[in-house]
Image (cartoon, helix red, strand yellow):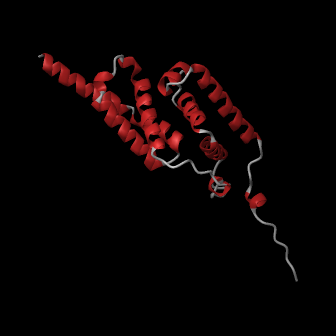
Amino acid sequence: MHIIDLLGGASIAKDRIAERRGRLYRVAYAWCGERHLADDLVQETLTRAIAKRHQLREPSRLDSWLYSILNNCWREHLRGRRPQEELDEQSLTSRHCTEQINQSGELCQRVLELMGRLPEGQRQVLSLVALEELSYREVAETLDIPIGTVMSRLCRARQFIARALEAPAPTAAATRPFLRRVK
């Protein structure tokens, strides 16, 4: 009977881990900004979590444990990657007509673009606090950094985004070159 309980518990643990896929994907996408890479990071995170589910000592800390694994996968990816390229202004401009997008959609898009411009550490902290509503202590434990670092990175990230949102957004008319008719 004991073996049957263990096997049943293993499938429950796998199900609880698999249920977190959407949340992990949201954070991974916020960190990397690429759908395919975020999906790969989540797959690797889930694979490792299921294989090492016996290492989870406190089931109530499942989310923090999974985010720690995701953070390790992300770090490994960054180690194997060339230095980060600078984003050009052209890649950050909207390609859609303002009539087609409502204001809230534009704001969300602009915030996502601004998050992509944040330094890596600030983007990680902001996404865990804002998207996943983790406490500062949970973020500190997840990323293995001091809580003071979490607070300062979060403050700088929020200030950057607030300042950028206060600046007027470039409009299609402002970015269009001025043409003069010559007879």
Horizontally, residue 163 falls left or right of residue 48, namely right
> Where 61 falls versus 21 (above or below)?
above
Horizontally, residue 55 falls left or right of residue 97, namely left
> Where 96 falls versus 8 (above or below)?
below
> Where 58 falls versus 93 (above or below)?
above
Q: Nearer the viewer, residue 22 or 92?
A: 92
All told, the count of numbered labels is 0
- Toward the left, the furthest residue is 1
Q: Nearer the viewer, residue 75 or 158?
A: 75
**Residue 144: percent from left, percent from top:** 49, 25
The C terminus sits in image quarter: bottom right
**Residue 36: percent from left, percent from top:** 43, 49
Image quadrant where residue 94 sits: bottom right
Instruction: Give me the residue at 39% from left, 36% from top.
Output: 21
**Residue 140: percent from left, percent from top:** 53, 23
Image quadrant where residue 49 sits: top left
Q: Nearer the viewer, residue 174 or 33?
A: 33
Instruction: Give me the residue at 61% from left, 39% from top.
Output: 119
Horizontally, residue 63 falls left or right of residue 116, namely left
**Residue 180: percent from left, percent from top:** 85, 73
- Toward the right, the furthest residue is 183
- Toward the bottom, the furthest residue is 183
> Where 126 falls versus 99 (above or below)?
above
Instruction: Give me the residue at 11% from left, 16% from top.
Output: 1
Instruction: Give me the residue at 65% from left, 26% from top.
Output: 152
